[in-house]
Image (cartoon, rainbow, N blue to C red):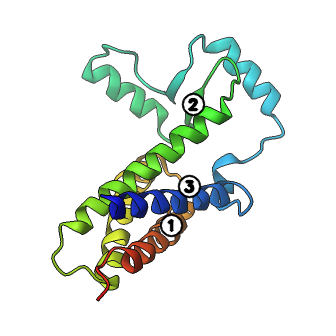
Amino acid sequence: MKRPLIASLVGGLILFFWQFLSFGPLNVHGTENTYSPNQDKIIAALAENLTEGGEYFIPAAPPGASAEEVQKVQENAKGKPWARINYRPAFEMNFGMNLFRGFTIDWLSVGLLVWLLMQMTHLNMKTALLSSLAVGAIGYMTIPYLNSVWYQTNTLGYIVDWAVQWGIVGAWLGWYLPEKK
């Protein structure tokens, strides 16, 4: 029980610190937070027109719209600007709780990978590394990449994260988990 716990704890820390570097000092995800010199005007317009926090796709048909109404909105939108907005009426940051939740998810994610790897009868460095990269690829393809298909977002930062963080975790687990003879 001690070996998987240590493996997942260290792996979780590897993910956590890479994510800190990726979103912070290395700015791998810089294109996701582009500055607009009109940000004050944009926020004022959003605050005036959106009363509740949430995620919005504009233009969209109202809830309960018929298929014909949805089609009309889509036809009218062709060739015009559109936006996907994550709006909150007040900026509040609970940095400590966000860090705690982030690390907990990283630890649990590596714990699940450790559990999968420990089901293998002949675990070695190559298998651990490739399995870890496969898990990272699944996560990348089913969330950031799929969103980029629909919302035309840039996923280069997530490709870097997938390769680096899951590669390092796989190397760690490939070194630590196999039984030493």
Expressed as whole percent of the image width and height from the top left, the position of residue 157 reads 57, 62
Closer mark to the observer between disc 1 and disc 3: 3
Closer mark to the observer between disc 3 and disc 2: 3
Locate the C terminus and report the quarter of the image it occupies: bottom left
Residue 105, relative to residue 83: is it above or below? below
Q: Which of marks 3 and 2 is nearer the N terminus?
A: 3
Q: Residue at x 76, y 19 (%)?
A: 44
Residue 148, relative to residue 96: is it above or below? below
Residue 145, relative to residue 166: is it above or below? above
Q: Distance between the residues labelled 2 and 1?
A: 27 Å
Question: Which residue, given by chain and number where applicable, does mark 2 sit on?
Answer: 86
Expressed as whole percent of the image width and height from the top left, the position of residue 70 reads 34, 25
Judge left or right: residue 55 versus residue 170.
right
Does residue 146 show up? no
Q: Earlier in the sequence, mark 1 or mark 3?
A: 3
Q: What residue type is labelled 3?
A: Phe
Question: Which residue, given by chain and number where applicable, does mark 1 sit on?
Answer: 165
Question: Which residue, given by chain and number where applicable, does mark 3 sit on?
Answer: 16
